[in-house]
Amino acid sequence: MREMKVNADSHAYPVYVGENLRFQVGRLLKEDYSSILIISDTTVGELYLEDIMSGINHPHIFHTLVPAGEASKNIEQFYEVHTKAIEYGLDRHSLIIALGGGVIGDLAGFVAATYMRGVDYVQIPTTILAHDSSVGGKVAVNHHLGKNLIGNFYPPKAVIYDVQTLESLDAKQVRSGYAELVKEAFIGDDQFLQQLLDIQLNDINSSQLIEHLYNGIHIKASIVEQDEKEAGIRKYLNLGHTLGHALEAEAGYGRIAHGEAVAIGILFALYVSEKEYGINLPYQQLLGWLHLNGYPLNISGAAPEALIRRMKSDKKNIGSRIQMILLQSPGNVTTKEINEELLTDYLTTFKRKLV
Amino acid sequence: MREMKVNADSHAYPVYVGENLRFQVGRLLKEDYSSILIISDTTVGELYLEDIMSGINHPHIFHTLVPAGEASKNIEQFYEVHTKAIEYGLDRHSLIIALGGGVIGDLAGFVAATYMRGVDYVQIPTTILAHDSSVGGKVAVNHHLGKNLIGNFYPPKAVIYDVQTLESLDAKQVRSGYAELVKEAFIGDDQFLQQLLDIQLNDINSSQLIEHLYNGIHIKASIVEQDEKEAGIRKYLNLGHTLGHALEAEAGYGRIAHGEAVAIGILFALYVSEKEYGINLPYQQLLGWLHLNGYPLNISGAAPEALIRRMKSDKKNIGSRIQMILLQSPGNVTTKEINEELLTDYLTTFKRKLV
């Protein structure tokens, strides 16, 4: 097991990454709670709920399952989970456990942040993608007009990552998760980046996975510690997300995996960075790696105008001018406002290159 | 104008109490914002929205009105106001202004706390009651199973209190607001308590009102500064609220004014305190003052069992045991667990005394 400490503004919390941790949650909890509510989805619940329960010895432990998928990250499910928490008698000294991928982490985290104005919660991510969302305290539900528009900054009390739960992921989910690892590597660690771009995703073992997740979380944590509320450099973690979110929204949430959309977004950020700064970035190397690992790259169905409309409602914008996260070199991130006309040109030529 | 500074965990903010302040909001704002959304209700909006707008010179200022009344403090209105904020193009550098009583303050504050994970907001309370809720950062909406169950701790950037807006209040609203002032006086300032119990509510002038609000807010602020997240002494501010909330819920929110319910709750807390500690408290003096000022005191319609069921779901409880806030003397507050059987006795005899 590998372990690190993340220093949030309000408190420090441990991140554990290792094997068999899903049976040891009770042992890893540092406080006593009056009751515990495990929130999961129907898919993950069937696979791992019993394992988690078997490792916690508590007289008042409850669970509630929401339908699997992004569609559950809405205000109705949010309210419904609150109803369960009230009905089970949770009080201010209760614990919520988020067992699942990013959807569950964001939804259960936001319930924890708002239940009686805030109770403790622990993240137990069960996807590679969720290594990103489980650390840093961003919790939210979607609004029908945009992703993650209703939420809080509310860090967990612990993140417990059992890599064995990742064995049940399909190839699409592995691709989705590794896109965020590649993003972190571009932002923070060139050696880690080269290591990632040398591997094939269908050929990773448990100890590599622990190492990659640990490295990715480490980069993320070091940024979040400096800027928890995203007033400055935390924005950099949105590399690839300006276009990524727009592609997801255009396709309909859940149709394209989040990380697959982000992968195209990172590639586009490299493309725009090369044009804007007249530099060379590992665009071709990334493109080759994405091809090799089966990332879907055809976005010919998405109209630039529609994408730009989506990009304008991005939370990182000031007013409705589009701010892109760009690279001046790997590890050297910046933000730049790109006007709509130029962005339309970039999107049009970029799309053509991909087909 | 009187002014004080409140030190929240995240930032310090000013509270202004005076006359004509509703025309000076722009001048009192300390930061530049990309856009401003005023959230109010249909009643208050008609009276003061124009005054507020006239004092703010900003190219992007919007407003949205919700129906007046406690029923608006629900998840649907919360979501609807988010929709407006998105449609008006608010970004992370926007300001929300809560113009109204406690319902608006709590609802708009919770929207501000969660819109894109948090934007600044300013409280402009227009009821006496809201002197309490506008300071201290508690924001929330109601769940159909209980009051204020979904919310955050999220302090405002300023509180701007124009006592002239209180001239439009009816006698019931004045009673409701003064009950919370009496509560604060019982907790923190015996001299202020005697001053309040000497006045007649239909005979207050503007400078008295400013003085009373200032004193009440001062007591509240000094407690909140020590315990923002209600881990300890902030609980004391719930004096009278254990029974008060139960009475409100039993009557149906909005049927009985919040402060009128709290007034009965304070009286009950004095009654129980005298019994539990064998002491004398100004029970008769408070009862006389409540009678003199027309507070409704007949609760014969509420069954003790129903009230106790409501009291058990109070957020301050540990598990489902009922914790009451009691006085050992004025200014000397404590909490005590009272078992159901004894509480039923107390409620039964107390009800009988009131009729």
Image (cartoon, coloured by chain):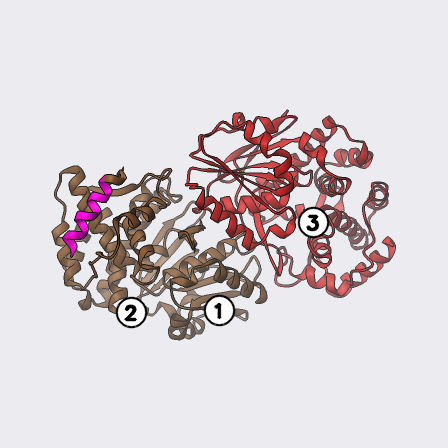
Chain colours: A brown, B red
Quadrant housing the N terminus of chain B = top right
- Crowd band around label 2 with a 10 angstrom C-alpha radius: few (<14), some (14–19), many (20+): few
Which sits in the foreground, B218 or B124? Answer: B124
Q: Amino acid at mark 2?
A: Leu
* Label 2 – label 3 distance at C-alpha: 53 Å
C-alpha span from label 3 to label 1: 37 Å
| Residue of label 1 | A64
Q: Earlier in the sequence, mark 2 or mark 1?
A: 1
Chain ID of residue with mark 3: B
Q: Which amino acid type is marked by label 3? A: Thr
Instruction: Identify the image quadrant of the C terminus of chain B.
Output: bottom right
**Disc 2 designates what residue?**
A169
Label 1: state its secondary structure.
strand
Q: In the image, which residues are magenta?
A: A342-355
Give the residue pinned by disc 3. B334
Residue lying at 54% horizontally and 27% vertically, measured from the top left: B28
